[in-house]
Amino acid sequence: MKQKIFFVAVVMTLISFSIAADDAGAKAPDSEVRMNIEPGSLQETAIRDGWKIELLDESRSAADLTTIEKDIILALNMVRSDPVRYAQLYIKPIITSFNGKFRVLHGITLRTDEGLIPAEEVYGYLIHHVPVAPVAYSPDLHRSAVELSFDQSKTGKIGHITSIGRSYDVRIRSNGRWKSGVAETIGYGGKTGLDMVNNLLIDDGLKDRGDRLIMMDPVYHFAGVSVKTHSDYGSIAVIDYAVAIADKIKGSK
């Protein structure tokens, strides 16, 4: 069985919003989070590989996220916090998995547009990238991401615009009060959170590698994610990003 992983080009904009934000979100006790680590999960992998998940996995206690969505936030924070180590542990093995434009992942043969080139490219990019701060999980950004992922899980469409014409900046604006820049990355295909993050980093078929650049941009401090099924690609993963909460910029705690 051959499948193709697909990515959507990312658009960024600088905007100021005036809608009130609620960045709270239900949390479970930290001890409970550590006790519920599932065998074979990204949590388990991260602990085995020595990552400080107490600093990188704060979304694990968010009651509104699925396991795979939490894994995406964790993987995103892993690569941001130590890009060199991430490249060596999780990108280098991908480079060896190619046969021309095809690679096998979880027993499935995937067809790529460019083959090995973007995987080698992202490896070099991360090896020379300085660490950046992890993103904090935002329930508001999760809601804006859900709006698109849910819509496309029903329609089978792709891109940043919902079936009723709402762009990512409109969706984010209606779910929070953000200061300055916002952005969105979308990946189609992938079985695990780590796969989805790696696919976005590789950015196969996108000449500007816009997803990769946003994911590693130190300007973004908040993120929300949503994963749904997709009729053509199996899954859709939407990650929405923001620079800062307007109220926090004004000095509120």
Image (tube, grey):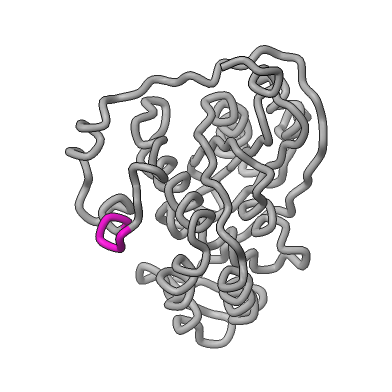
Find out whether residue 128 is within the magenta segment. no
Q: Is residue 24 above or below residue 242?
A: above
For the point 26% across and 31% down, the residue is 30
Side of 31 where 136 appears, left or right: right
Q: Furthest residue to the bottom?
A: 100
Of 137 and 65, nearer the camera is 137
The secondary structure that dominates the magenta segment is: helix
For the point 49% across and 40% down, the residue is 228
Q: Quadrant of the C terminus?
A: top right
Q: Quadrant of residue 64?
A: top left
Q: Furthest residue to the left?
A: 35
For the point 65% across and 49% down, the residue is 218
Question: Where is residue 45 shown, x and y percent of the image?
Answer: 29, 58
Question: Where is residue 178 shown, x and y percent of the image?
Answer: 70, 25
For the point 51% across and 87% down, the residue is 99
Q: Is residue 51 above or below residue 150?
A: below
Q: Is residue 112 visible?
A: no
Of 191 and 131, nearer the camera is 131
Magenta stretch, residue numbers: 46-50
Q: Is residue 67 above or below residue 31?
A: below
Q: Quadrant of residue 165?
A: top right
Q: Furthest residue to the top?
A: 20
Side of 244 where 146 appears, left or right: left
Find out whether residue 49 is within the magenta segment. yes
Q: Furthest residue to the front?
A: 251
